[in-house]
Each structure stands twice: as C-alpha cells, then as structure tokens.
Image (cartoon, rainbow, N blue to C red):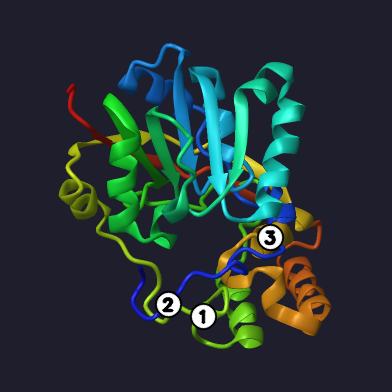
Amino acid sequence: MIDGWQWDETLFAGAAAYYSRGRLPYPPGLAATLADALQLDGAGRLLDLGCGPGTVALALAGLFGEVVGVDPDEGMLGEAARAAERAGVGTARKARWVRARAEELPHDLGKFDVVTFAQSFHWMDRERVAATVRGLLRPGGAVVHLADWKAEIRTEDGLPFPAEPRAAIEQLVRDHLGPVRRAGRGVLPNGTPGGESEIFARAGFHGPQRLIVPGGAVLERDEDDLVAGVFSMSYSAPHLFGDRREQFETELRELLRGASPEGRFAVRVPSAEAVVWRVGEE
C-alpha cells in the first residue's frame, strides 16, 4: 500500500455520477490495439479491477464472451450497470458487476484470459493483488495496465476554443482543501506510487510489452463537463468539501466563465499506454 495512507470507502464518494462525463475518453483505437496484441476472438473472459463506471470493461466488451467489473464503490457499479443497459441487451447480458476490493475478491469468479487495471492499480495493495491475479489467469493469459502515456507532449496550439485552465482549477482546490493532496480520509503528500513493472515481475509475470495507442483528436467541452471532471477526481471528490461544496462549485464556475465567456473549451484526447504482462503457457 501507499506509505502512510490507508484505503477507505470514501475515496471516490459522490464522484460516480460525474465520472463518465468528466473524464476524458481513451483513444478510439484502444480496443483494436488490444485485440491484435492479445489475439482476442470474442470468446474469452475479461476481469476489470477497479472498473469504476465500466469505462474500459464496456469499451472492450465486444472482444470477450464475458466481462466482470469489480469495484468497491456502489455508486460506480450502478453507473456501470446503467451504461451496460444503454449499450444494448447483448452487452448487458455479458457484463457482471461485483462490489469488492481487489484484495478481497470472491472465490467463485473463475478463471480469466485478461485482467485490466485502468488507472486503478496504484490504489491497491499491489504486491498482494498482483499475486492474486496471477492465480486467476488461464495459461497464456495477460494483465494490461492502462494509463495516459506519460511521455507524450500535449500541446494546446491550434485548439478552436480555450483550453481547460488546469493550473487555476488546481489552485482553487488547494484554496478549499489545503496544500496536501486529499484521498478519502487521508492525504497523499507524495502522490501515488509507480514501479508497477517491478511488482508484476516479482509476481512471476513475463514482459512487459508496451503498446502506445495514439490520441490527438480534438474534443469540445463545456462548463458542465469541466465541473464534472473536477468532481470525478479522488482529490476533489464532492464529499471532501462538506458544507462548502456549493460555494466551491460557484467559484469554480466563475473561474471557468472567466477563462471562456462562451462556456466552450477544447482539449486533445491523450494517447494511452497499455503495458502487457503475461503468464506462461503451462
């Protein structure tokens, strides 16, 4: 676990309703890239740990016969189930949502061909979860760790509308919540950890194979999208503001209107990095 921090159930309390609208999407080529790299034929099983509102599980559902999303937040799973229904009967029937922490998985989940962590692994007891996941994978199975591509240089040049005033928003959050990053009932003075490669290697996985999925498409965003983005983050989840939440939102909207009186913003979809670790053909 993160030194000096302990997970608790308030980590994303109140954030679920904002997540899908507020978070930027993965690049549209993600599913095709993984299908090619993992030779997926639509018949296997996917386990998405820390699935949130089902963003990745549902994006990849067409590549598997069954998808299981696991998350400890009841609100996130409710959003995932509704999103699956909107995606159609076929998707809803193949999707299953389980409320649990990755450290406390039910014993009846069965075996999987692929396990995904989409910007979620850092919240877990990573050594323990990596070892557990290895035991859940079928021979030849794979773990995929997904995140924005950190080496990408993202430019705001040529955008049709103002970019999100990220630095000003972060300062406003600090003005309300203090200078140290909040996370649930605790704080993260040093942020979240890296070093996933060493952890998966110690757990007996082979690799990694690094896949870059190009982004770059320009998205138009409005004021409500950006407000949702702020409230979707663990460090600025709604519950953290207590009875000052409405005041914070008022100030946030004033800031955004100052940055773009029209209420229109633009951003480029970030590229994604998918790091693949495999188990042997036993």
Callout 1 environment at 10 Å: few (<14), some (14 to 19), or many (20+)?
some
Q: Which residue is mark 2?
A: 5
Which quadrant does the C terminus fall into?
Answer: top left
Please name whichever residue, 129 or 258, is drawn nearer the observer in this view of the structure. 129
Q: CA distance from mark 3 to mark 1?
A: 17 Å
Q: CA distance from mark 3 to mark 2?
A: 20 Å
Q: Position of residue 55 (x, y in %)?
A: 59, 39
Q: Is residue 65 above or below residue 236?
A: above
What kind of residue is marked 2?
Answer: Trp
Classify residue 181 as left or right of residue 141.
right
Classify residue 29 as left or right of residue 190.
right
**Quadrant in the picture for residue 271:** top left
**Label 1 close to label 2 by CB (< 8 Å):** yes
**Quadrant in the picture for residue 97:** top right
- Label 2: element kind: loop
Q: Position of residue 25 (x, y in %)?
A: 57, 41
What kind of residue is marked 3?
Answer: Ala
- Label 1: element kind: strand
Q: Residue at x 63, y 71 (%)?
A: 236
Q: Which residue is mark 1?
A: 186
Q: Residue at x 56, y 29 (%)?
A: 59
Q: Is residue 64 visible?
A: yes
Q: Which residue is mark 3?
A: 15
- Label 3: element kind: loop
Q: Is residue 161 visible?
A: no
Q: Position of residue 21 (x, y in %)?
A: 70, 48
